């Protein structure tokens, strides 16, 4: 009970509330906090949630972003000389390195993360995995950050609006499934809905509902392939033209958001009929419709309104060394930063589509237990994982074998990204362990989640790394 008799809220994730309160108390006691976060959609939203909460709690702080928290990066953070460092969306996997600096009295770490922890712990460590919650599917870095933000709020519910960003982070980390966000994430969704910033709906589960012109929207739908429409511009236009539907307004293609509910129903039914007629399995047809999330304070028809498009916009900034732009957008800049982000987004989309095309043309090499490709300098190392994820199950690439993707990081280092499927994880696949162990065996380092992980290895060790990774995956699935 607080002084005025109001019962303390349990918070969005009751299991983590007590520990979140301890972490919040430590932050309030700090002179100045260095907030350090990861450079992807989840990392940016984690930072934005934490930054907003620190700001509102009047705790002075600075923000830095990092591609990867290795020894050199942690040393740089320590040298910045803050008494307290708040790590969001990374830190758990590097607790062994971080705790050395803590022991040396350089700073007190507070970690809000969801990655597999290293073999070390620290006092202020807010990670769902420590509370029996799955960090790959039930709570993201932004979610952990949000739990902390709720513990930092001055009045019950004052930070609930930040649930919108936490949901963008979860979706950016691919935690959304057909039935929507679940587990601890569901508590955050409920907060966002209650705060009036978030809407949960059942809708066509195709990327680009807010911004893509209708024909492109259907043509590019890659999750459920419909013969004659997917990857077929004329096919998509012909399909739409056969429907009783106004396709253009003021000479411009309409978008999914521009359609009325009745019009959307018309399209969905026709898509289903076409899919059935083309022999698409019923299970895949079901996947056409799913749970979607919209941010109600954002303008309709913009990338920011749809959570999934928002997360791509953020990746388009952070993965190109412009995390500052993405953070500004998250913090509400709808002028210069948003304009800059949109330019970066056009570039990101072109890179994703060229990257995917390159992989499809070159094909992959299938080993005993994994398949792989080496993009060299053809695909930027910061997005090779996204391309690998989009490639699994695409034309000519198997959907039932984990994929490893290599890209050149520098003349000395190679980046590896690994992606699996939930079915493989159910059978024992843990790519986080594969990346960690196989990279260590060749003098590198890595980690991540069971279903998606990454590593950095020394140049020239690809073959040895592959042999190790193939063997470990074989053991896990055997
Ligand atoms: O740093 P980290 O957690 O943020 O990165 C998560 C990455 O893993 C995202 O880029 C996402 O694309 C990928 N991922 C995935 N499938 C999942 C979960 C995550 O491809 N089921
Ligand atoms: O970039 P991000 O990791 O947020 O992309 C998430 C998913 O959105 C991709 O795996 C892909 O399926 C889809 N996407 C797309 N077209 C784009 C960008 C993303 O279909 N231009
Ligand atoms: O970079 P990519 O999207 O492939 O990263 C997938 C996951 O692997 C992320 O969660 C990331 O934090 C993790 N990772 C890691 N160590 C690396 C590279 C990636 O833990 N060296
Ligand atoms: Zn994350």
Image: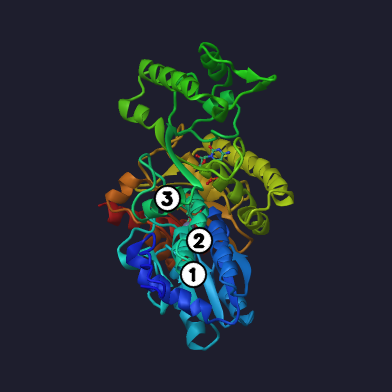
Q: Position of residue 38 (x, y in %)?
A: 55, 62
At 58% from the left edge and 38% from the top edge, which residue is drawn? 358
Residue highlighted by disc 3: 189
Q: Label 1 neighbourhood size at 10 Å, few (<14), some (14-19), many (20+)?
A: many
Rendered view: 391 above or below 380: above
Quarter where residue 50 is shown: bottom right
The residue nearer to you, when weighing 401 against 470, is 401
Quarter where residue 464 is shown: bottom left
Cβ atoms under marks 2 and 3 closer than 8 Å:
no
Earlier in the chain: of badge 2 and badge 1, it is: 1
Q: Quadrant of the N terminus?
A: bottom left
Residue 350's label in the rendered image is none
Residue highlighted by disc 1: 152
Q: Is residue 72 left or right of residue 267?
A: right
Earlier in the chain: of badge 2 and badge 3, it is: 2
Q: Secondary structure at mark 3?
A: helix
Residue 159's label in the rendered image is 2
Q: Position of residue 382 (x, y in %)?
A: 58, 54
Q: Position of residue 60 (x, y in %)?
A: 62, 75
Q: Secondary structure at mark 2?
A: loop
Extreme residue in the bottom direction: 104
The residue nearer to you, when weighing 162 against 276, is 162
Q: Label 2 neighbourhood size at 10 Å, few (<14), some (14-19), many (20+)?
A: many
Q: Position of residue 175 (x, y in %)?
A: 42, 49
Tell me: is circle 2 under 8 Å from ligand 4: no
Q: CA distance from mark 2 to mark 1?
A: 8 Å
Q: Is residue 469 left or right of residue 165?
A: left
Dot in front, 2 or 3: 2
Earlier in the chain: of badge 1 and badge 3, it is: 1
The residue nearer to you, when weighing 230 against 20, is 20
Q: Label 3 neighbourhood size at 10 Å, few (<14), some (14-19), many (20+)?
A: many
Q: CA distance from mark 2 to mark 3?
A: 13 Å
């Amino acid at each position: 009970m607080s002084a005025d008799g109001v019962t303390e809220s349990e918070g969005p994730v009751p299991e983590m509330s007590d520990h979140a309160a301890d972490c919040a108390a430590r932050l309030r006691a700090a002179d100045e906090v260095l907030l350090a976060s990861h450079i992807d959609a989840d990392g940016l939203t984690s930072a934005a949630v934490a930054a907003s909460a620190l700001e509102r709690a009047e705790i002075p702080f600075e923000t830095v972003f990092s591609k990867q928290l290795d020894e050199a990066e942690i040393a740089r953070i320590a040298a910045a000389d803050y008494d307290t460092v708040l790590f969001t969306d990374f830190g758990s996997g590097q607790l062994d390195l971080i705790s050395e600096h803590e022991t040396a009295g350089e700073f007190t770490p507070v970690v809000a993360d969801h990655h597999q922890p290293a073999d070390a712990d620290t006092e202020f460590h807010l990670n769902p995995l420590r509370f029996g919650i799955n960090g790959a599917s039930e709570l993201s870095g932004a979610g952990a950050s949000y739990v902390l933000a709720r513990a930092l709020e001055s009045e019950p519910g004052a930070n609930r609006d930040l649930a919108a960003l936490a949901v963008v982070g979860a979706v950016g980390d691919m935690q959304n499934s057909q039935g929507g966000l679940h587990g601890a994430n569901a508590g955050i969704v409920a907060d966002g809905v209650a705060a009036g910033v978030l809407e949960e709906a059942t809708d066509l589960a195709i990327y680009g509902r807010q911004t893509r012109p209708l024909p492109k929207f259907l043509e590019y739908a890659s999750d459920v392939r419909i013969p004659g429409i997917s990857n077929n511009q004329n096919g998509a236009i012909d399909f739409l033209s056969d429907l009783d539907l106004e396709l253009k307004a003021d000479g411009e293609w309409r978008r999914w958001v521009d359609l009325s509910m009745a019009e959307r129903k018309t399209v969905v039914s026709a898509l289903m009929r076409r899919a059935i007629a083309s022999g698409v399995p019923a299970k895949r047809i079901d996947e056409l419709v799913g749970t979607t999330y919209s941010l109600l304070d954002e303008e309709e028809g913009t990338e920011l309104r749809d959570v999934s498009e928002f997360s791509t916009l953020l990746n388009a900034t952070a993965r190109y060394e412009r995390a500052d732009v993405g953070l500004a957008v998250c913090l509400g800049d709808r002028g210069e930063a948003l304009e800059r982000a949109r330019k970066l987004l056009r570039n990101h989309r072109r890179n994703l589509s060229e990257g995917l095309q390159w992989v499809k043309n070159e094909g992959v090499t299938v080993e005993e237990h994994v398949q792989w490709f080496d993009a060299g300098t053809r695909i930027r190392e910061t997005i090779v994982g996204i391309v690998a994820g989009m490639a699994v199950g695409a034309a000519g690439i198997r959907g039932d074998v984990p994929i490893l993707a290599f890209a050149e990081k520098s003349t000395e280092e190679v980046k590896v990204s690994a992606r699996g499927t939930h079915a493989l994880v159910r059978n024992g696949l843990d790519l986080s362990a594969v990346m960690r162990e196989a990279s260590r065996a060749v003098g590198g380092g890595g980690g991540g989640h069971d279903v998606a992980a990454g590593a950095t290895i020394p140049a020239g060790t690809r073959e040895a790394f592959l042999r190790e990774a193939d063997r470990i995956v074989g053991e896990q699935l055997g």
